[in-house]
């Protein structure tokens, strides 16, 4: 997601032109995404560091409780939705 937005902002080949209004919004999105992801990956387990090879994106630890709650709520909704269809 971050890479796509950076390339769009740079107007790389195939990305097309963007309006100045949209450009400002996308710059804010890139800043926000950068703030929500880990820069220093030394705190990750060795197995994740071996898998990473520099291209995986990890959320900052402070964001994990929020993501867990979102996942729980979505899982509950998905399970309810599936059981309603089969009933």
Image (spheres, helix red, strand yellow):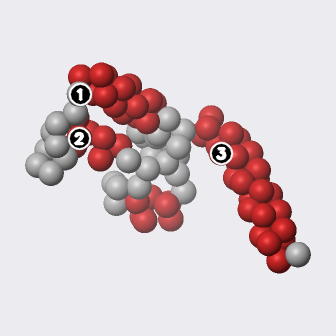
Q: Nearer the viewer, residue 79 or 59?
A: 79
Above/below status of 64 relative to 71: above
Mark 2 vs mark 1, foreground winner is 1
Q: Are marks 2 and 1 in contact (CB under 8 Å)?
A: no
Mark 3 Cα shell of 10 Å, populated few (<14), some (14-19), many (≥20): few
Residue 68 circle label: none
Above/below status of 60 relative to 23: below
How much space separates mark 3 and mark 1, taking CA atoms? 32 Å
How much space separates mark 3 and mark 2, taking CA atoms? 27 Å
Q: Is residue 27 visible?
A: no
Q: Which residue in the protein does label 3 denote?
A: 67
Quadrant position of residue 31: top left
**In percent of the image, x 22 and y 43: which residue is there?**
7
Q: Secondary structure at mark 1?
A: loop
What x and y, as percent, mark residue 3?
30, 46
Mark 2 Cα shell of 10 Å, populated few (<14), some (14-19), many (≥20): some
* First of labels 2, 1 by sequence position: 2
* First of labels 3, 2 by sequence position: 2
**In percent of the image, x 33 and y 54: which residue is there?**
54
Q: Which residue in the protein does label 1 denote?
A: 19
Q: Which residue in the protein does label 2 denote?
A: 8
**In percent of the image, x 40 and y 59: which residue is there?**
52
Mark 3 vs mark 1, foreground winner is 1
Q: Secondary structure at mark 3?
A: helix
How much space separates mark 2 and mark 1, taking CA atoms? 11 Å
**In percent of the image, x 17 and y 43: which residue is there?**
16
Quadrant position of residue 24: top left
* First of labels 3, 1 by sequence position: 1
Q: Is residue 86 visible?
A: yes
């Amino acid at each position: 997601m971050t890479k796509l937005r950076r390339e769009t902002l740079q107007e790389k080949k195939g990305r097309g032109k963007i309006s100045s209004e949209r450009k400002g919004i996308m710059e804010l999105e890139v800043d926000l995404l950068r703030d929500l992801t880990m820069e220093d990956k030394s705190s990750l387990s060795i197995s994740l560091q071996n898998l990473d090879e520099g291209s995986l994106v990890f959320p900052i630890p402070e964001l994990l409780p929020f993501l867990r709650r979102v996942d729980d709520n979505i899982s509950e909704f998905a399970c309810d939705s599936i059981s309603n269809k089969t009933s």
